[in-house]
Amino acid sequence: MSIADHFPPPLRGRPFRVREALHRGVPASRLRSRRLCRPFHGTRCWTPPTSHADRARAVAPRLRYDQAFSHTTAAHLLGIPLPRRLEADRRIHVTTIGKDQAIRVRGTVGHRTRAHLANVVRSGTTPIVDPATTFVVLAAFLTVDELVIAGDALVGWLNWCTVDELRAVVRRHRGGRHVRKARAALAEVRPGSRSPGETRLRLVLVRRGLPLPSLNHDVVVGGRWVACVDLAYPDARVAIEYESDLHRSDPQVFRKDLTRGERLKDVDWWLIRATADDVGPLADDFVERIRRLLTTGTAGRHDTRSRHPVATFT
């Protein structure tokens, strides 16, 4: 018989607070069992939490009605991409909305904010500070570029909010700490991005003087759909794909990429593949290459070979 069989059904399969278990008639001696995990003071769970989200759910029974997960913890729960240095941070961030005391539990970081500055959304029973406010408070932890990636995720592939909603929350926080960084990042957030790599690639191109490319552009020629590409300059018929390690390690993705490239070549488009080096140490060379292609592509045909018939050799 498992230890869960000795507990009331409402406590099984989820983290719970010791106080709740006592109210339900569970003996204190049973709550001291080594077969239960103690991730935070005053809480118990059935298995050790392995991810940041698991740790957040383990502390959730300690939250009051006016408290919600925020900052990097909200980012984890919402799926917002974070840099590696923050992925390893095990601390759970909780914001108290209003004038009451911030949370004081070892392993957590307590914050406070005024009631008109944040709203609470729920993922199941888990309270989270709303996505737009999460974008603003993440400015305390992220660089401008990292914050642009977070914003692109929120208005792009995650679709948690719109650019207008981000703009309204940034205005609401005017005068606050790090709001200048949030405002600077917001100016470069664009809907349509589908990955952090695409965002970094766009920033590299635009900051070095190239026009803003179309994001996730559908190439249609003669009324026929050919391909969807990460970034595109349609007038010059130049398509750019960001290739992560997944494109190399997944055979199905690799074959799909090859097919896309051949189809674009058939309709006189260039397909340029970018890697992490092209948005890092080789960025200047990569941008100059794209600049030359835009000049050539805008001027005429991509294929500059002679159109004269090939001589017959005997």
Image (spheres, grey):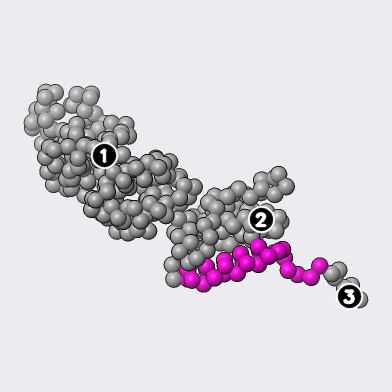
Please name whichever residue, 276 or 258, is drawn nearer the observer in this view of the structure.
276
Separation of marks 2 and 1 at Cα, in angstroms = 47 Å
Q: Look at the picture and state if 190 lies above or below 57.
A: below
Separation of marks 3 and 2 at Cα, in angstroms = 32 Å
Residue identified by numbered label 3: 313
Is there a contact, CB below 8 Å, between mark 1 and mark 3?
no
Q: Nearer the viewer, mark 1 or mark 3?
A: 1
Q: Look at the picture and state if 306 lies above or below 126.
A: below
Q: What range of the chain is rendered magenta?
A: 282-307
Indicate which disc, 3 or 2, sits on the residue closer to the N terminus: 2
Left or right of 237 in this view: 242: left
- Determine the residue positioned at 11% across, 30% down: 19
Q: Nearer the viewer, mark 2 or mark 1?
A: 1
**Percent from the top left, x then y, of residue 57?**
25, 38
300 drawn magenta? yes
Residue identified by numbered label 2: 264
Indicate which disc, 2 or 1, sits on the residue closer to the N terminus: 1
**Which amino acid, by three-letter code, is at mark 3?**
Phe
Element class at badge 1: loop
Element class at badge 2: helix
Instruction: Please tell me how crowded label 2 is: few (under 14), some (14-19), or many (20+) other residues with Cα within 10 Å.
Output: many
**Percent from the top left, x then y, of residue 199?**
45, 55
**Percent from the top left, x then y, of residue 261?**
63, 57
Residue identified by numbered label 1: 118
- Determine the residue positioned at 27% across, 46% down: 173
